[in-house]
Structure formats: structure tokens, C-alpha cells
Amino acid sequence: MSKIVILGGGESGVGAALLAKHQGFEVFLSDQGQLKPEYQQNLVDAGISFEQGTHTLSQILEAQEIIISPGIPEKSPIVKEIKQKNISLVSEIEFASRYTNAKIIAITGSNGKTTTTLLTYHLLKEAGLKVGLAGNIGQSFAKQVMENQHEYYVLEISSFQLDRCFKFSPDVAVLLNITPDHLDRYEYQFENYIQSKFRIFQNAGAPQTCIYWSEDPVLMSHAQALPKHAQLKTISFSDANAEMLIQNNQLIGRSQFHLALEDAPLKGPHNAINMSAAILAAESVGIQLADIYQALKTFQNAPHRLEPCGTWNGVQFINDSKATNVDAVYYALNSFQQPIILLIGGVDKGNEYEVLDELIKSKVKGMICLGTDNKKLESHFGNICPQIFSTDNLQLAVQKSIDWAQAGDVVLLSPACASFDLFKNYEDRGNQFKAMVKLLQDGE
């Protein structure tokens, strides 16, 4: 019996272990941290041996194949040992895709992939399809494949997952954009990260549909890497031949799709791209226009993505805590015409802030740097933004924003940075911000 080892006991790792056991493999799961009690119970119930708090190398290196958590970097000692032994090392996505005949829509991009994935899933589900949501969001893809209840899957795929995909070939592949992110995982070489994202197309042939924003600068400069034989569907702000044209505040599809952006569930030019990709993906699997129009009316985006979280004295507060890179902030700033007070900062991931300079000059009346080390932000924007305040306290940040704000202004939390210096994660940061806005509204 072939042995499968799973490294990492989170949602994807435990799901992969359950699927591997279901397929008849000998399975062992190893996690250097502590497994959640419910995951431990899942493994015990399935008769799967596991360890936590350590990696026993002798056990791990006995495997014929290893399924690795996307959170474990390539440069970690355990991965180096596995590579030296030439043991097959794959992601949960690669492994699980071998055991399903369902149609798969896979979505990646530096920004917007969660929104696009959720909207695509919503369009399919509302049209009555048996569809699962997985990848970086929802339940484990592998576990859902084992349960075999879906005819379609919509997967949000990260670069880390793509790094360990080799034969994965989704029926519809979406690449929204590529901007610098996670460079600490890619030896600070942007080209390495670009190549990782392009792996979404690596096995695309004639039966597959590939959807992308044709004016993304990186995709334009790497056009030779686009698949030659797949069905290409483009999104554009200027090309009348694009499958979806965004022009004059409208989405105009070659399929006769037509939507005024003022009636759309998502705002901002970046979300026009996200909506276009989701609509094209839904059309690609046969969803009718009437069903798409109907489903768009009921879509609600996930929290922490340009999320309105209240108004106080005529000042609108927006929680965009998920904006953990510079380009996400660029999109956020472009979504508002009103004067903005910007809350920015956290753990810098090698950010280059120059792309924001003109928007900061033209739109931002005040910048509040929120982090334990704000020197880089203060240095870069000191001569660009009219007023800057620096703090490591969210309450003080919100207080300063209301000191500066006037009726009609927007207070925008869009950090461009990771959250781990002051918060558990971006959700914690966004939730604390929303709680403080609610206190304002309640007069406390």
C-alpha cells in the first residue's frame, strides 16, 4: 500500500488526509503546531495516524507522495529534506483534482480573487447548479471531493498552492492581475512570483477557457506565456473586441450582457474587472444571462473588502482591512470621489509606495500610520500628504480621523500591510475598526 504523508493539519491538510484514506492509501499527518480538537477527532474517527508539535523526519520520508500545506515555505528545512529524497511534493489542490470529474473554475490574482470567487460561486449556486466553494475559502476541496456531492467547484487559488500544482487543469482558469506580493516567499524576485501565478494556465488546451484582464501591465509584458490553444476571453477598458468591455460606466459583453455599474453590487473600477471575470466564468459553464442578472441583485461581498461600516456626523467609514498590499490600496483610493482620511500601515512586506503618490496628493487630506514601525511610511509620504499622524493604537487612530474629518469625507482603513504587529490577522484588525465605529455611532 502506498504511503501518503500530509504536512500541516489545518482545513486543507485534514481534508487531504481524509480523501487519501478514502482512496485506500496509508496516511500519516504531521503538524509542528497543535491541531484543533475537531480536526483531531476527524482523524481519529477515520483511523488516520498523526502527530502534532513536531515533524518526525523518518516517518515523513517513508512517503511515496507528500501533500504540503501552502503555509509551509519552500525554503523550510523539511522541504529541503523532501526534495533531496526526490519524493513527490504536491498541494491539496493537485491531489484532490485527480479524484473528481466535476467541472472546475479556478481563480487567482494578487488582488480581487476572493471577491471574484465568491461572486462566481453565487452565480452558479443561484442558477441551481450543485457547486462547491473551496481552495483558499470555504471547506477543504479534498474533503468535498471525497463526499462527492458537487458537479462544479469554484476554487480560489493562491500562488503557494499553484507552486505545487503540476497536472491540475481547471475547465475555466481566471487570472485577474499580478502585482508584487508575498515577495518574501519568492526570494524577493518579482519574476518568480509572476511565474507562480501563470501556473494557473500551465495545462490549458483547447477544451479550457482562460479569462484575464488584458490591460494588466504584467500580463501584457508576459503575453508570450498566455496559453496558445485555449479559449481566451479578455476583459478590457478600451478594446471593443474584448469578451467584456468596461466603458462609460457599463459592463458590455459580447454575449449581449449589459449592466450599468450604478446598478452593480460592487463599486470601483477594480470590482468592475472582478465582476466581469465572474460573469464570463459563469457564462463559460452555461449559465443563462437571465439567471446572472437575477443573481447579481442578491450578492453580498465578504467582509473587510471596501466594506461600509457606518456613518458618523456625515463621515463615512470604510473597512478595507483585506487590502494587505499596495495595489489593493490603489484600487480602494480610486473607488471614492470624496476627500479621504487614510489609515495605513502594519507589517511592511517589501512595499514600494510610489504607485500611490499621485492618488495620495489628489485624494487624501490626511494619513494615519497605524503600526509598531511607521518610519518607512512617514519618510515616503511626509512631503506628499498634507498631514500625517503616527500611532500604534487603533483607538487613537480612529480618534484622530474624526478630529480631521468633516461631513462628506471618507475614513478609509486600507493598510497596504499585513496585520501581525498589532492584530491576530486582517479580520481582527477590521473587526476592531468596525467595533470602534459602532461605539462612535452609539455615542460612547
Image (cartoon, rainbow, N blue to C red):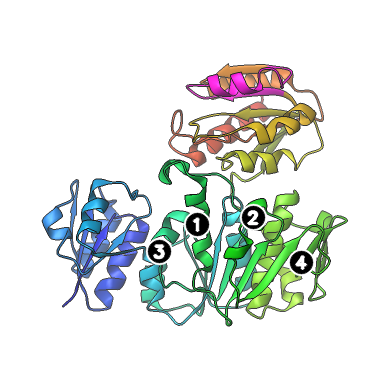
Residue that mark 2 sits on = 221
Q: Would you name the residue on which mark 1 appears?
A: 195
Distance Cα–Cα, label 4 vs label 3: 32 Å
Q: Nearer the viewer, mark 4 or mark 3?
A: 4
In terms of sequence position, does the residue under pointer 3 or pointer 2 come before the other?
3
| Marks 4 and 3, the one that precedes in the sequence | 3
Q: How far apart are marks 3 and 2 (CA)?
A: 35 Å
Left or right of 439 on screen, residue 16 = left
Dot 2 or dot 1, earlier in sequence: 1
Q: What residue type is labelled 1?
A: Gln
Please, what secondary structure does the residue beneath circle 3 have? loop
Name, please, the residue furthest toward the left: 58
Circle nearer the viewer, 2 or 1: 2
Mark 2: amino acid: Ser
Query: What residue span does the magenta drawing correspond to?
Result: 366-387
Q: Nearer the viewer, mark 3 or mark 1?
A: 1
On the image, numbered disc 4 is attached to which residue?
244
Name the disc covering residue 140, or none.
3
Three-letter amino acid code at the position of disc 4: Met
Write down the quadrant of residue 17 in the picture: bottom left
For label 4, the crowd category at 10 Å Cα-Cα, with few meaning under 14, some 14 to 19 and many 20 or more, is many
Q: Which numbered disc flags the more N-terminal residue, 1 or 4?
A: 1
